[in-house]
Each structure stands twice: as C-alpha cells, then as structure tokens.
Image (cartoon, rainbow, N blue to C red):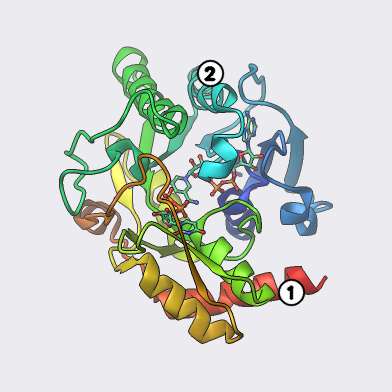
C-alpha cells in the first residue's frame, strides 16, 4: 500500500487531495497546523482506517515514514500569507528543508506545490516554465513569492546533490468548494459578496486577468505528476489557460447568483500582477493532462458550496 504524506492536507487543495488518494486506495497521513485549513475540510475522513491526521507545523522537523510526500503546507491567499509574512517564508523555506530531509531519510518521492507567483508580474505572456520571472524581492507579496522560489531552489539542489526523486508543479489560480470564505481571493470574495447582496469589490479597473482552474482538474494533474517516470522533475505549469478579466469574472458570478450587488471599485493592491495565463504544453505532453471543467460549470459547484456554508 502506498503511504502518502500530505502537508497542508486540511486546506482547500490538500483536503481534496486526501479524498482523491483515499479513493485510490492510498494510506494517507495528513499533516497540518490549521493556520488556514480546518478540521471541517477533512472531518468526513476521520474514522477511516487509512486516514490519519496529525497537528504539526512543518517549520519543525517531522519523523514519520512515507513513500510519497505532497508538500502543500503554506497559506496561499494574499490576505493569509501577508498576515504573518515571516512565518510564511519560514513555512516555505524551513518547511521545504524539513520535508526534503524527511524524503531523503526514508527515500520517498516528493512533490512541491509551487506557484505561478514565481513568475511575479510577468513580462512574458503566456508564462512558459523556462521564464525566470519578474519578482519584487522586497514587496508585500515577496514573503510568498520568494519563499516559493527558494523552495524550488532547495528541491532542485536536493535532487542534484542527493539524487532525490523530486517533482515540482507550478499551480495557477485554482478555485472550488472548500475555499476559505474569508481568504480574500477573488473567486471566494465575489461569490460570498454576491450571496450576501454586498458590493462586489473590484480592485483597480478590473481589467487585470487571471486563468482559473477548477479544483478537480488540478488534483488530477497533481496525482499524474507524482506518478510520472523518475527523472522527470519539472517544473510543470498547471492551470487552466482560459483567461478572464476580473470584470468578466464578476459578471459571471452575478449572472449565476442573481441578487442586487453593484460593482465597487477599490485601489489595486501593490505588485498585483496585470495578467496571468499558463502555457500548459509541457503538462499536456508529459502528463497527458488538460483541464476539462469550464469556468461556468466550476462556478456553479462553488456557488452551491458557499450557499450551503452561509446558510449553515
Ligand atoms: P490553503 O491555505 O487552503 O492550504 C494551506 C494549508 O497549509 C492549510 O491547511 C494550512 O493550515 C496549512 N499550513 C500553513 N502553514 C503551515 C505550517 N507551517 N505547517 C503545517 N501546515 C501549514 O491553500 P491552498 O489553496 O489549498 O494551497 C495549497 C498549496 O498550493 C499551497 O502551498 C499554495 O501555495 C499552493 N498553491 C495554491 C494555489 C491556489 O490557487 N489555490 C495556487 C498556487 C499555489
Ligand atoms: N481581486 C479583486 N477583488 C477582490 C479580490 C481580488 O478585484 O475582492 C483581484 C486582485 O486584485 C487580483 C485578482 O483579483 O488582480 C486575483 O486575486 P487573488 O487574490 O484571487 O489571486 P492572485 O492575485 O494571488 O492571483
């Protein structure tokens, strides 16, 4: 049986990954300090003999056994990662060192959930894996961006220096049920605002773009990447290349939810990337992976989730 460790397993993506790997017959150890994750996300798995939950902060060493490690621990939304920026960098950097050390000791394969933020405010569009990025090292987003960049460095140095079996995936904006309602990310913000009849907060003029991937597609990609042949390490972009402006997203959410919300314009946050779209040719070639869920369909599921959450 495959013993799989998932750090950040009680978070948005981690909890869906726990579900998927349990379904696939894995023996799952979920490690989380519950900074942004919650027991509610994995409550339905508690009691399953192949699921184990451990409260632990990855900035401290961890001694467990595993065949595969998915390293997802890190707050992902700007509001959460800027709440305690020093801890955010520590989580990415010390967390990577600890998990890589663990992988080395038990000879496990290890996958890093990196991010499109390593490209910063990109000067190249769409973003290819070979692009080195345009990142501010001292701004409010740097704790996240540079932490993730340093984690990638550590992964590749452990690979070169210790022959570790690594996989690095650069995730682009992903959405779906179990997003945190107060995480400040655009999809959760717009849906929650629309459901409550509040103003939809557009930062800047709303012309900036993002490409949104539905969580089920993303999880499929992560599992495929983990199980590629040894020697293929990435980095691989993973996201949905369909690009939308924030105004288009607001329109779609309002159309689905209905209600009386109006658009309210707010200043654009510092270093907010103007556009972002993954080039996923490599994922298509190496993993045979391509997202299948259209934004409207994914939004329907996500609206249903938040409707349930708000009425509970
Ligand atoms: P999330 O905040 O829901 O999940 C992160 C999880 O990590 C939470 O459960 C949190 O409690 C846990 N965590 C944070 N610090 C920890 C620590 N020091 N020790 C142990 N656990 C800790 O975010 P998510 O969207 O599920 O993101 C998961 C991973 O994917 C993150 O590494 C993130 O950077 C990456 N990612 C996500 C997206 C996205 O759009 N969702 C995009 C790019 C990259
Ligand atoms: N955004 C917005 N209104 C909100 C929240 C976010 O217009 O209420 C914008 C934000 O400025 C950014 C985009 O939506 O341009 C995506 O923001 P998010 O925090 O979801 O992700 P990231 O910036 O990390 O890609």
Q: Quadrant of ligand 2?
A: bottom left
The residue sitting at 63% across, 47% down in the picture is 11
**Which one is nearer the viewer's eye here, 229 or 177?**
177
Q: Which residue is mark 2?
A: 94
What SS does tag 2 mark? helix
**Which one is nearer the viewer's eye here, 53 or 137?**
137
Image position of 24 with respect to 198: above or below:
above
Q: Which residue is mark 1?
A: 308
The residue sitting at 29% across, 45% down in the picture is 236
User: Which circle, 1 or 2, is nearer the viewer?
Assistant: 1
What SS does tag 1 mark? helix
The residue sitting at 74% across, 74% down in the picture is 308
**Which one is nearer the viewer's eye here, 186 or 231?**
186
Quarter of the image where one finds residue 144: top left
Residue 133 in the image, given as x and y percentages of width and height = 23, 36
Q: Earlier in the sequence, mark 1 or mark 2?
A: 2
Q: Quadrant of the C terminus?
A: bottom right
Image position of 26 with respect to 54: above or below:
below
User: Would you call the spot at circle 2 few (<14 residues within 10 Å), some (14-19), or many (20 or more)?
Assistant: some
Image position of 92 with respect to 23: above or below:
above
76 with respect to 183 (left or right): left
CA distance for labels 1 and 2: 37 Å
The residue sitting at 42% across, 55% down in the picture is 173
**Ligand 1 contact, mark 1 (Cβ < 8 Å):** no
312 with respect to 209 (left or right): right
Image position of 42 with respect to 190: above or below:
above
Residue 181 in the image, given as x and y percentages of width and height = 66, 59
């Amino acid at each position: 049986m495959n013993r799989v460790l998932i750090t950040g397993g009680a978070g948005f993506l981690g909890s869906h990954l726990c579900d998927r790997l349990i379904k696939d017959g894995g023996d799952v150890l979920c490690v989380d300090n519950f900074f942004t994750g919650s027991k509610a996300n994995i409550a339905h798995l508690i009691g399953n003999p192949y699921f184990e939950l451990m409260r632990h902060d990855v900035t401290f060493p961890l001694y467990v056994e595993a065949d595969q490690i998915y390293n997802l621990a890190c707050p992902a939304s700007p509001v959460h990662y800027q709440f305690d920026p020093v801890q955010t960098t520590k989580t990415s950097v010390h967390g990577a060192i600890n998990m890589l050390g663990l992988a080395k000791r038990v000879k496990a394969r290890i996958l890093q959930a990196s991010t499109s933020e390593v490209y910063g405010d990109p000067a190249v569009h769409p973003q290819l894996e070979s692009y080195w990025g345009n990142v501010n090292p001292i701004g409010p987003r740097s704790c996240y961006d540079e932490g993730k960049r340093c984690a990638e460095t550590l992964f590749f140095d452990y690979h070169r220096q210790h022959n570790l079996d690594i996989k690095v995936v650069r995730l682009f904006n992903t959405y779906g049920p179990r997003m945190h309602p107060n995480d400040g990310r655009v999809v959760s913000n717009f849906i929650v605002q629309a459901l409550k009849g509040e103003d939809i907060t557009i930062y800047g003029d709303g012309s900036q773009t993002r490409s949104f991937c539905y969580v089920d597609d993303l999880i499929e990609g992560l599992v495929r990447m983990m199980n590629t042949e040894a020697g293929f390490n990435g980095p691989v972009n993973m996201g949905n290349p369909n690009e939308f402006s924030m105004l288009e997203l607001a329109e779609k959410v309002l159309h689905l939810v209905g209600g009386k919300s109006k658009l309210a314009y707010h200043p654009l946050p510092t270093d907010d990337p103007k556009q972002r779209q993954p080039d996923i040719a490599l994922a298509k070639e190496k993993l045979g992976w391509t997202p299948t869920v259209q934004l409207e369909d994914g939004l329907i599921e996500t609206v249903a989730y938040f409707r349930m959450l708000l009425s509970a």
